[in-house]
Image (cartoon, grey):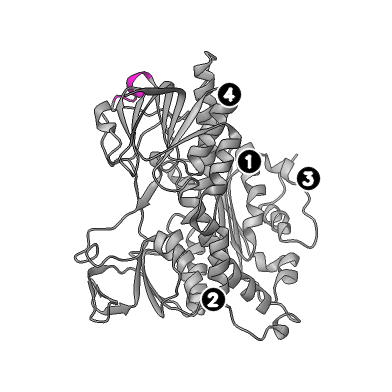
């Protein structure tokens, strides 16, 4: 069997894999990408794009209903079928023709099928029709296979075949009732979307909502979900799950009580797609997250790059930050590092350099598209204290900003700034409120660039916008002395 040789092989043609391949090609590397499903991956068809399309219409309707003059003009309810049709257009009806065309234009070859790493720098691909293709890499193999929904070990859960996020974002009909297991981003976003469709939603969370965020974020989102009609069960978890006679779900709670629903969505976490890739031949555990350095080279148990450093793990598979934008950031670093090493150029690992993904550690931005939105970057107050920083926490109600008065007649929101008192720079920022996602990049720049507070005083927010919250946070903190 003939072997086709490239400089770089990328396994997984999602957003992350596409970016690894693109940067490698731009660095002069011949590159092939392998995909077993749709080119474009989870984000394009079952995660970021369809979920936000499902959320957008309801958010706009509720925002309009909170503005006098517009609220009186709205007489209808959300057209759910039209929302689903728009979601279908956003996902290109689950066809990847456009993404394939992009690969061709970028000079990236595509091989479809399931990939297994069968030798150092060798990948064997088996297509759906059984055709086998052997690929060899001169320089690197990058694993960008993403993650899948975790199904916890609850009696009857797996056998009952519940929804995962892929089902919730691609559903063609809306159930009358939906139970959601989980309290993280996917859980609260889908609770928001389906409650907006008129579905009776019950949310079951083991502890609080959005635990990775500042506590007030989960509290405000919980209040909003209840206002939408969602029943929120905190500090609760299922002890068993079974199908009912009418093909619904019966969920027995560990603290007593039973919930019945037409559908059950499990959104309690993710597992890496690293099974059946052949990784165990290189001393790695199949089905485990990949440990990587800041250029995304996979590390072995000894902390050194595996087998000389030709294997990379980029995106969700390394568990650094399970976010598409952060995976693409890693991909740019990895692709550039692969090309540099392949061309014999030095690759330095110092923080914030060309070839490293330093921001993964302390400056990850994320927006949760609930209503209100949650936008955060950097460390929470609790995380900053745990890391040993001497901090000051500054809170300010966004509803007191003039821009909030313009945006809504009933604005609810909160801002928090976590300051490193020793260096007088911002470690983390959290905004909760309508449209705060568009505030986040200014916070990200402040955190990444470690802009001193005395310089931030000269970044004047325009009036009357939500950005004025920056001025109010600084005023609350107090102007640094000369």
In 3D space, how far apart are the residues under numbered discs 2 and 4 (Cα atoms)?
46 Å
Q: Earlier in the sequence, mark 1 or mark 3?
A: 1
Q: Which residue is mark 1?
A: 424
Q: Is residue 278 left or right of residue 404?
A: left
* Quarter that holds the C terminus: top right
- Secondary structure state at the residue bearing disc 4: loop
Q: Residues within 10 Å of mark 4 (few under 14, many from 20)?
A: some
Magenta residues, start to end: 302-308
Q: Earlier in the sequence, mark 2 or mark 4?
A: 4
Q: Residues within 10 Å of mark 2 (few under 14, many from 20)?
A: some
Q: Is residue 394 left or right of residue 4?
A: right
Q: Earlier in the sequence, mark 1 or mark 4?
A: 4
Point 40% across, 31% down: residue: 292
Point 46% across, 66% down: residue: 190
- Secondary structure state at the residue bearing disc 3: loop
Q: Nearer the viewer, mark 1 or mark 4?
A: 4
Q: Which residue is mark 2?
A: 80
Q: Are marks 1 and 4 in contact (CB under 8 Å)?
A: no
Image quadrant assignment for residue 34: top left
In 3D space, how far apart are the residues under numbered discs 4 and 3 (Cα atoms)?
39 Å
187 or 99, which lies in front?
99
- Secondary structure state at the residue bearing disc 2: helix
Image quadrant assignment for residue 170: bottom left
């Amino acid at each position: 069997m003939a072997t086709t040789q490239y400089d770089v092989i990328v396994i997984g043609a999602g957003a992350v894999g596409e970016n690894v391949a693109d940067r490698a090609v731009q660095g002069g590397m011949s590159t092939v990408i392998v995909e077993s499903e749709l080119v474009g991956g989870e984000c394009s068809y079952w995660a970021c794009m369809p979920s936000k399309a499902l959320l957008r219409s309801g958010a706009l309707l509720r925002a309009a209903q909170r503005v006098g003059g517009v609220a009186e003009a709205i007489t209808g309810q959300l057209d759910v079928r039209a929302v689903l049709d728009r979601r279908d257009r956003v996902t290109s009806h689950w066809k990847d023709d456009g993404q394939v065309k992009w690969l061709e234009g970028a000079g990236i070859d595509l091989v479809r099928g399931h990939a297994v790493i069968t030798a150092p720098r060798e990948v064997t691909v088996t297509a759906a029709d059984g055709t086998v293709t052997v690929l060899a890499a001169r320089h690197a193999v990058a694993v960008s296979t993403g993650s899948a929904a975790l199904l916890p070990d609850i009696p009857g859960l797996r056998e009952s075949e519940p929804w995962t996020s892929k089902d919730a974002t691609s559903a063609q009909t809306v159930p009358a009732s939906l139970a959601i297991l989980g309290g993280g981003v996917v859980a609260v976003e889908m609770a928001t979307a389906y409650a907006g469709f008129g579905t009776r939603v019950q949310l079951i969370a083991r502890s609080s909502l959005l635990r990775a965020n500042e506590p007030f974020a989960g509290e405000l989102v919980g209040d909003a979900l209840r206002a939408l009609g969602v029943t929120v069960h905190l500090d609760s978890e299922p002890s068993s799950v079974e199908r009912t006679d009418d093909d619904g779900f019966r969920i027995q709670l560990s603290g007593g009580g039973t919930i019945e629903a037409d559908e059950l969505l499990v959104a309690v976490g993710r597992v890496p797609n690293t099974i059946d890739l052949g990784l165990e031949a290189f001393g790695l555990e199949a089905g485990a997250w990949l440990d990587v350095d800041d250029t995304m080279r996979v590390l072995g148990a000894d902390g050194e790059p595996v087998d000389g450093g030709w294997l990379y793990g980029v995106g969700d598979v390394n568990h650094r930050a399970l976010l598409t934008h952060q995976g693409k950031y890693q991909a740019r670093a990895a692709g550039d590092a692969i090309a540099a090493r392949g061309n014999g150029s030095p690759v330095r690992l110092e923080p914030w350099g060309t070839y490293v993904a330093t921001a993964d550690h302390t400056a990850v931005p994320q927006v949760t598209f609930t209503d209100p939105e949650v936008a955060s970057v950097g460390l929470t107050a609790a995380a900053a204290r745990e890391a040993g920083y001497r901090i000051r926490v500054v809170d300010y109600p966004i509803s007191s900003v003039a821009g909030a008065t313009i945006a809504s007649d009933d604005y609810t929101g909160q801002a928090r700034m976590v300051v490193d008192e020793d260096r007088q720079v911002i470690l983390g920022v959290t905004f909760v409120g309508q449209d705060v996602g568009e505030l986040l990049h200014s916070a990200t720049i402040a955190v990444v660039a470690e802009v001193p507070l005395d310089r931030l005083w000269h970044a004047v927010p325009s009036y009357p916008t939500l950005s004025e919250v920056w001025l109010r946070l600084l005023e609350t903190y107090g102007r640094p002395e000369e």
